[in-house]
Amino acid sequence: MTAGWSRRARKHKLTSRGIEFSLSPGPAMFGTESSLSMFLNTLTPKFYVALTGTSSLISGLILIFEWWYFRKYGTSFIEQVSVSHLRPLLGGVDSSSPSNSNTSNGDADSNRQSVSECKVWRNPLNLFRGAEYNRYTWVTGREPLTYYDMNLSAQDHQTFFTCDSDHLRPADAIMQKAWRERNPQARISAAHEALELEDCATAYILLAEEEATTIMEAERLFKQALKAGEGCYRRSQQLQHHGTQYEAQHRRDTNVLVYIKRRLAMCSRKLGRTREAVKMMRDLMKEFPLLSMFNIHENLLESLLELQNYADVQAVLAKYDDISLPKSATICYTAALLKARAVSDKFSPEAASRRGLSTAEMNAVEAIHRAVEFNPHVPKYLLEMKSLILPPEHILKRGDSEAIAYAFFHLQHWKRVEGALNLLHCTWEGTFRMIPYPLEKGHLFYPYPICTETADRELLPTVFHEVSVYPKKELPFFILFTAGLCSFTAMLALLTHQFPELMGVFAKAFLSTLFAPLNFIMEKVESILPSSLWHQLTRI
């Protein structure tokens, strides 16, 4: 009876709504195929609408999350999870193995190198907090400085303006606490309290920086600070060799005096007395030649450019544009501006393409390429392709923060040189054809650090400023995939809702095409294998 049933069932086929399934001769497989066929027959167009709509919703949520994660952290969440967690489970190399010890050490060294490259520096041309930053806040209602930037300034003030012996002088003890206060009004009140005890230079500095609402008022307070600071400096200079405590006190008084004189020079520059500012800066650099950490030469370069004294600018560059000294956007782009000035007034892209570049033009283009490689964010600000904001109090070398600080003060100098911006516009993008990609090595400088975006997002107000990123990150594959999946399933849901019968026909045709290879294989297997063997296999 079983053999007879097998012979009858060998070529048995079930046709359901145009879909043909080959059934195996075993009763278990016959039941499974029958159940599947009955399930597909009972499906309605509403089910397909719900299925595709749910798939579209889920893929859309995944797309939104992936996009948010990419914008915030610069990488794909799915890709990061796959690399970090799934790869070791699927046979990745154990990181604790001896063969990987050298690699891990190399990664640690590269991380340490990137951290050193991403050191944050005090902005040499930083604005006055009370007379400039606060006025911007009063007018626009926006905070131009981030908490991270102001916290770095507080740390700088504690480093430069305090020492271990401050507790011996009541006014200095009050100011030591004032520099640690987060509330601006508390700092200002502490400064006034210190001035009631004695003439305190650091108290005048705090009031000039934060309470003064105009540059003239700030200059008046800095002059009072200079008088008090010079007295402290002379007294500590005589006692500096009497012990480590006196030496630390003299070092603090030196920092205070240099800071006051530099800010007075900046006040003169802002009030239009540029020649006076240049003289004060030159005298300060001669009096304290070892305090290069203040980068006073960058203030001097900007003032000389304002006077259009290009010969003196070249002399300063010859001294500070040295291979052993750390570079900056001010150094590189000022050197490019001077070389562009020699040829920019007669430069024409059409003429240069016909006759080729002259030696002077080639030198100018190479200087621009050198500057752009050092900081690729600057050209868009100089060419006004990107809007400027107030520069932060701290900058990151080669980052967007340094580009903003440079362009904020030097854009006027580029505009003053006829044709300089035109030459920059025609040649700056050619830099990227010479830099290897990915940025595993540089062309004229060390490789561009990968940590600048994170630091710049901490230094710049991202609420109303879009941080410039280099190199521009491409969208990860998973974001593109989920976007395509979301769009495709949403389209299927819409079409199924609008045309249920037509989409049902397409679905059946798709399923029949999908099962056609399996159907063909099953028929071939049935024709080759003996019926008794096939029956025994299905029973097993």
Image (tube, rainbow, N blue to C red):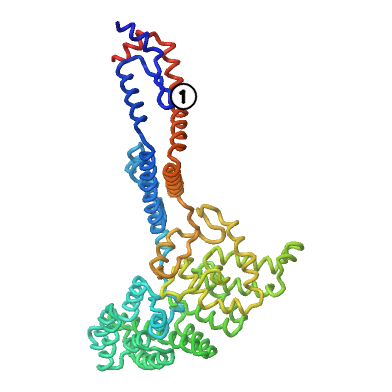
Residue 409 visible in the snapshot? yes
Helix or strand or loop: what does disc 1 sit on?
A: helix
Image location (x, y in percent) of residue 267:
46, 88
Q: Residue at x 62, y 75 (%)?
A: 338
Please, what is the three-letter code of the amino acid marked with disc 1? Answer: Pro
Image height check: is 200 above or below 116?
below
Q: Which of 214 and 181 is in front in this view?
A: 214
Q: For this view, does 30 lie left or right of residue 485?
A: left
Q: Nearer the viewer, residue 42 or 192?
A: 42
Number of marks present in the image shown: 1
- In the picture, the quarter occupied by the C terminus is top left
296 is higher (above) or lower (below) than 117? below
Check the picture and name the quadrant holding the N terminus: top left
Q: Please state which of residues 337 and 388 is positioned toward the viewer in this rendering.
A: 388
Residue that badge 1 annotates: 517
Structural crowding at the residue carrying mark 1, measured as other residues with C-alpha within 10 Å and reported as few (<14), some (14–19) or many (≥20): few
The residue drawn where x is 63% and y is 64% is 427
Q: Give x and y (percent) for residue 211.
A: 35, 87
- Tell me where residue 363 sits by quadrant: bottom right
Residue 216 occupies quadrant: bottom left
Task: Estimate the x, y position of residue 51 in percent, counting from the top left.
Answer: 36, 41
Identify the residue at image location x=33%, y=44%.
85
- Residue 361 located left or right of residue 153: right
* Residue 482 position within the rendered picture, expressed as x and y whole percent measured from the top left: 42, 47
Residue 484 higher or lower than 258, as above or below: above
The answer to which of 522 and 142 lies nearer the viewer is 522
Residue 98 visible, this orientation: no
